Image (cartoon, rainbow, N blue to C red):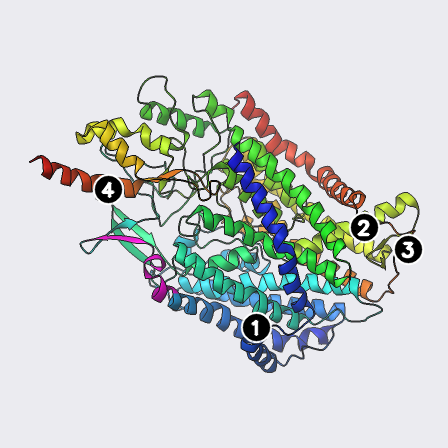
Amino acid sequence: MTVQGWMLILVFTLILVALAKPVGLWLFAIYEGRRTPLHTVLGPVERGFYKLAGVDPNAEQSWRRYALHMLAFQLVTLLFTYLVLRFQDVLPMNPRGLAGLSPDGAMNVAISFTTNTNWQWYAGEGALSNLSQMLGLTIHNFLSAATGIAIAFALFRGFARKQASGIGNFWADMTRVTLYVLLPICVVYAIYLIASGVPQTFGTIVDATTLEGAKQSIVLGPVASQEAIKMLGTNGGGFFNANSAHPFENPSALTNFIQMLSIFVLGVGLTYTFGKAVGNTRQGWAILAAMLTLFLIGAGVTYWQEAAGNPVLHHLGLPGGNMEGKETRFGIAASALFATVTTAASCGAVNAMHDSFTAIGGLVPLFNMQLGEVVVGGVGAGIYGFLLFAILAVFVAGLMVGRTPEYVGKKIESREVKFAVLAIAVLPLMILGGTALASVLPAGLAGPLNKGPHGFSEILYAFTSAAANNGSAFAGITSGTPFYNGLLGVAMWVGRFFIIVPVLAIAGSLAAKKVHPESAGSFPTTGLLWIGLLVGIILVLGGLTFLPSLALGPIADHLAMIHGQLF
Amino acid sequence: MLKDFTTALRPALVLTLLFAALLGIAYPAALTGIGQVAFPHQANGSLIEENGQVRGSELLGQNFASPGYFHGRLSAAGANGNDPTASAGSNLGPASQTLSDRVAKDIAATRTTPGNSVPADLVTTSASGLDPEISPEAAFYQVDRVAKARGLSVEKVRAIVNGHVEQPLLGFLGEPRVNVLALNRDLDKRVASGAKAAE
């Protein structure tokens, strides 16, 4: 480990904290539906969209209607992308004559991008036309991110409103977030990426003659426009197979730094927005403090392990940190930090191959996802997931002191706790159930590249990544088979919407309640005690649920690694 | 409940099409326009052209096997390595026998004198399989071989490498590194001119 490495982690965290308030205020303006300077240009677009779609943006929706309209939109966009991918061979902008994807393959990708997962069984440069990348995938990168933030807004309203029947309007939330948050940032961001070396062209392939006289076919495309929203929307689906490790997606240490910031920036901002929405910004800061505590532990452990390196290679006479599967320009610190960030959020972009991390260095990304990606988390998904844990935490605190639990002025009663537990139980069910199935069926066992416990880790990582809607992989696994396409597709869908619907139910239930002003008897949800309780609940729940599976995978792998037991 | 769902169909269909046009066509097309006008070199892959022939991209690694060139990272991209149509890492885990065997073999092939320590980045695969860079240590490690193959003095080759070492931004962003393709092109140019001067 080096001073520069720690400085990177420190400066990164400080910049994030500094961005929380300005970004949170901007998001708060959109949450409230206020007019912004951008409305001068984009206001007519917004109104035009509503008019053509027959939407009244001011019509309040009950949680049921909000959920149903959201689901209808997901199904239609899913089908749209399925068709684009399935028939890319007959659609335009396919000069390389790539075939349409298989039914199970196209469905898996459509689910993957609709659910903000961006799990990719295919290699982008070899399988998808430019049209598929733009029209099939880029739109979901925007819309799935906007949907996540819309759900967070709905939940915020549940906490903020008094005896209300509605939790907002899905169409308005989704459209506004897309137009006034995601799109403008992405335009500026993508221009920066192009200037830094990320290609942006409708051309596809250029043949070069290398210095040694060999032919090298260089794949190009509209990369920058997809790259920007891929990071900002915590999507993570790369234009190329190597994702943000590819020099065309992430050419320099500075683009890498900006990419890491852009994964976290909206999630961090939303903690402040939550505080504003419930009228006490300290509530937001407390959440951010708990998140950053967990984040720094993860980043520290990963960096420590990757810098310590692989004893197997040390034994061969190769001292130092673990450079297998890492890029020279990022080195060990920026690779470890990126891996922690991308799995703490539900991004899933990678700038190094997690499969080749040391055993414990790879355990942290895995565990980050298993905690439900509530450490900053995906855009919207992080904060609503975190608030589920907050509900559980006040419930536990209430049990300990024998009072009805309250959180930001709302009584937390059996209905909310039931829905929170329901949502939290989805991840273990999908992750452990899917992993168990794949570990015994021949079609599942055909997947892993590595042998021994690391092969099990590859399966566990795949189901964890899918159910948690992350999308990164221990990429040695071959998952483009009907078995994995199907099962992972189910895990992604359930992992997204079987959490969102209970969240909306909680929002509806909370919105209908009275607000209780804080009294001397209320459990304070801003101080250190609260932050400690939150961190504790998250770690204990995650630990109890997933430790056995981690023992079979990365922990066994670690013991093998330090004792030179090879597979 | 069903009514809620059917009333959602029109906005769902219409907004899917409108957003597809805006985000899937207009947005990437506008950026392509901006990129092609403002940054044509970068937008088209930072290509290196010589006499009308494309020799590669500044950002992508190439295969170098001959002793007179500096060698880059090992690559798992494509069957022969450094194939931009198949970017990939090795994905071998830390306790993999395949990894251990491969590294042992490459250490033996790369090591210049028995017992000295080979820079790690010379015997490990990069994440993308297209890494254009190596560490300065990895470059200096190859100076003797390159100098010998080219009939140049070690000092001269060392000086050329030194001219290509890039330092981290602000001291902590990124790692010290050398772009292998740029270094090798420079070497080709200098040796040609050096040979002329000697005539």
Question: Can residue A494 be seen in the rendering of this structure?
Answer: no
The stretch in magenta equals: B35-50
Q: Are marks 2 and 1 on the same chain?
A: yes
* Image x and y of residue A518, in percent: 88, 57
- Which residue position is annotated with label 4? B186
The residue that appears at 77% across and 58% down in the rendered structure is A280
Where residue B19 sits: x, y (%)? 53, 71
Magenta-span inclusion, residue B39: yes
Same chain for marks 2 and 4?
no
Spot occupied by residue A170 in the image (x, y as percentages of width and height): 67, 70
Q: Chain of mark 1?
A: A
Q: Which residue is mark 3?
A: A519
Which amino acid does the dot numbered 4 rest on? Asp
Q: Mark yes or no: residue A266 visible.
A: yes
- Provide the secondary structure element on which disc 4 rests: helix
For residue A504, the mark is none
Tell which residue pokes out farthest to the front in this image: B170
Disc 3 secondary structure class: loop
What residue is pinned by disc 1?
A38
Are discs 3 and 4 both within one chain? no
Residue A525 disc label = 2
- Looking at marks 1 and 3 on the same chain, the residue that comes earlier in the sequence is marked by 1
Q: Quadrant of residue A203?
A: bottom left
Q: CA distance from mark 1 to mark 3?
A: 41 Å
Distance (Cα) linking label 2 and label 4: 62 Å
Q: Earlier in the sequence, mark 2 or mark 1?
A: 1
